[in-house]
Every structure is written in C-alpha cells, then in structure tokens.
Image: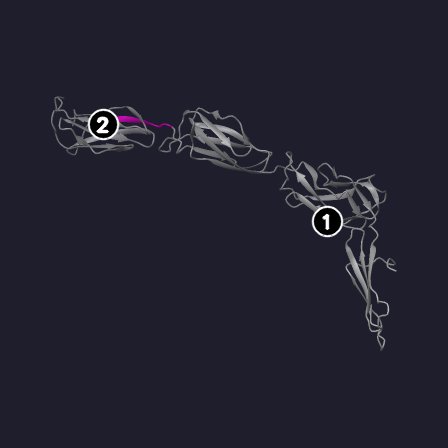
Amino acid sequence: TATTQITTSAASITTDGSATLTVQLRDAAGNALTASGGTVALATTLGSLTGVTDNTDGTYTATLTATAPGTATITGTLNGNAIADDATVTVTVGAASTATSTITANPTSITTDGSATLTVQLRDAAGNALTASGGVVTLSTTLGSLTAVTDNADGTYTATLTATTPGTATITGTLGGNAITDDAAVTVAAGAAVSLAFSSQPPAQVDTGVAFGVVVEARDQFGNVASAYTGPITLALSAGSGTAGTLLGGSLTVNAVAGVATFTGLTVDSAGTGFTLEASDGALPTVTSTAFDAAAPPVGVADATATPVAGGAQRTEAWGVGVTWRDGHASLLGVLSAVGVPAVPARPARLSYSPSLPLPAGRVA
C-alpha cells in the first residue's frame, strides 16, 4: 500500500462530466503488478464513485461524478489497509441549462409610475448557479416594455420592465435561442392620480328641476383610472356659465370609489344656455365639463276620446268620455275618464282619474 498509486484521468471536471480513477498496484520496490493483487475499495469526499472494476492486470478503475462544485479527494484501501496515495479532482459548474435556469422579478407588483428588475440566473443541469457568462439571453414580455438585456458576466442577466397600462406582465426568455422553462409575472396597477376627467358628461340639454348625472374619474399620468384614489370630489357650476344666479342642486361632493366618483340627482333651477360644471378635489387641477343648456319642462297636452250616445238612442244607453294627459316628450302623465248611464231611476256620472304624475294645475278644461 505504500507504493501503490491512485491517479485520475482529469484533474478538473464539470458537473456535467466525469473522471476515471485508476489504482495501480505496486510491490515494495515500486514494480507494477500485472495481475490481480487483492481487493481494492475507493472513497471520495465529493460526488459519487461507481463500483471498482478489477481489470485483472494489476489495475482497478472507478468513475467519479459530482453534482456540486468543489474538490473531491479520492482515497483507497487494499484488502482493508489504507493506500498511502490519493488523488484530487476539482469540480466546477456545468453548462447552462434551459430547464433549470431561473427568471425572477423584483418587485413582483408595480404601478405605471414604477419599474421592476428582471434577473435571469443561469444554472447547470444540477441546478448550480453559473458564475460566468453562459450564452446569449433574450427576454420578452406580454405587457409593457423591457430594456435591453445586460450580461453581468457572473452568470446573471438583467433587464428593466415598465408598463403604461394596468394588467399582468408575463416575462419569458431564451438562452442561445432555446426557450427557458421558467418565467416570471409582474402585476401592474395604475399609478398615482395626476388629473381629473369627466368620463360621463352632462346631457346636451336638461330640464330645470329634472335630475341628471355625471361621472368623474381620477387618472394617472397615462390616462388610466387611478384605482387607489378615494378622495372627495366636488362639483360646481362654472363661474360665468349659463344664467347668473342659477343654483346647482343635489349631492355635490362624492368620495371616489376606486378612482371613480358618480354623481346622481343633479339639478339646475334656472333656464339658460352654455352651462358647464367644474370638478375639483383641492389638490388636482380643476376640470370643466362640456357645455349644456337648461330649459323649462315642456307643456303637456291632452288627448280626448268619447263614446257618444247615438242619435235616437234609448235613455238606457251608456256614454263615456276619456282624457289622456302626456307631457311634451309623449310620456304618460295620467288618464281622466267619465262614464254615465242616464237610465230611470237616474244615476249620476262616475268620474275617475288615474295619474302617472300629478297633473299641472289648470291645464285640463
């Protein structure tokens, strides 16, 4: 065991490779044996060894493989006695693998005002991180845009993601033109509110005292609804618009929900043209609506129908009169009817009114 040698076919291998270990038995004078000389066993401090093969020519061989980088020291015994010699093999990271390389995002949630850094970490087939460049990496995204990929020469590659619209960006990559199995996702939300806008304008014409509504949104720098905005928004008639002294009625301050303030039940009490609304929150720039006109509600009209008594009819025949009241938009306001049977004994006429809305005073005669 003092003169027997242990040698390796490669002083350095990668995690993708292997090295052959050979034991050459020698006599005390250092002469190589040419036949089997006993039972040889081998052990390693890193990786694993196949079983020892007795080549029946004084040599014994085994194969070393390792999945982690480091230094493997191989020792042996002959018939249970330690062989004085040993061998060392340096193990380094293998070639980059598309199956084990990773793509990560930091952070995984941004707004349209921010950005995320995408990092590709190349790894070998055993999952070890490369510490040097391992090929050409490209990245692509389903939302937003990416800067050019930077090779950091340490096994990592980086790029920056930005987006102007909310949604989910899925980032994929290739290595040497082959798809990397892993991907990354970044959630994009609307940014901070920088402006207000009427997403629903007032009607072109309203009736005085008749309710209408508008919707005001808080928007980020790219025009997206700023969903994190919950501030109070206030409406007012623009100074100098419409008829002087007109009052705007209804709930004029509304707290936005997810960036949207919905106003209902608005009214104006005077007729006029060129009214505009202003929306403000005390911080963002005031925004003005499109112009609208206001007019008094249209006067209603009545349509009359009658079932007359035919000439010479008997006193027992019935008669009837009906009046239908509609406004200027042809909407039903009410029905007025009268029926009578002037038979003997005489009966008074019956008069009934079924309103949909109260009839304007003095308009039916």
Mark 2 packing: few (<14 Cα in 10 Å), some, or many (20+)?
many
Image coords of residue 278 (percent x, y): 76, 40
Which region of the structure is painted magenta?
Answer: 87-95
Q: Residues within 10 Å of mark 1 (few under 14, many from 20)?
A: some
Judging by the rendered image, the residue that carries numbered circle 2 is 21
Type of secondary structure dominating the magenta stretch: strand
Residue 120 placement, left or right of 351 = left
What secondary structure is marked by label 2? strand
Give the camera-side residue of 323 and 57.
323
361 or 323: nearer the eye? 323
The residue beneath circle 1 is 264
Kind of residue indicated by mark 2: Leu
Instruction: Name which residue lies at 84% across and 75% down.
Output: 343
Decide if residue 108 is on the left or right side of residue 44.
right
- Residue 89 located within the stretch drawn in magenta: yes
| Amino acid identity at mark 1 | Thr
Q: Nearer the viewer, residue 69 or 56?
A: 56
Residue 236 lies, with reference to residue 115, above or below; the image says below
Q: Nearer the viewer, mark 2 or mark 1?
A: 1
The x and y percentages for residue 25 are 15, 26
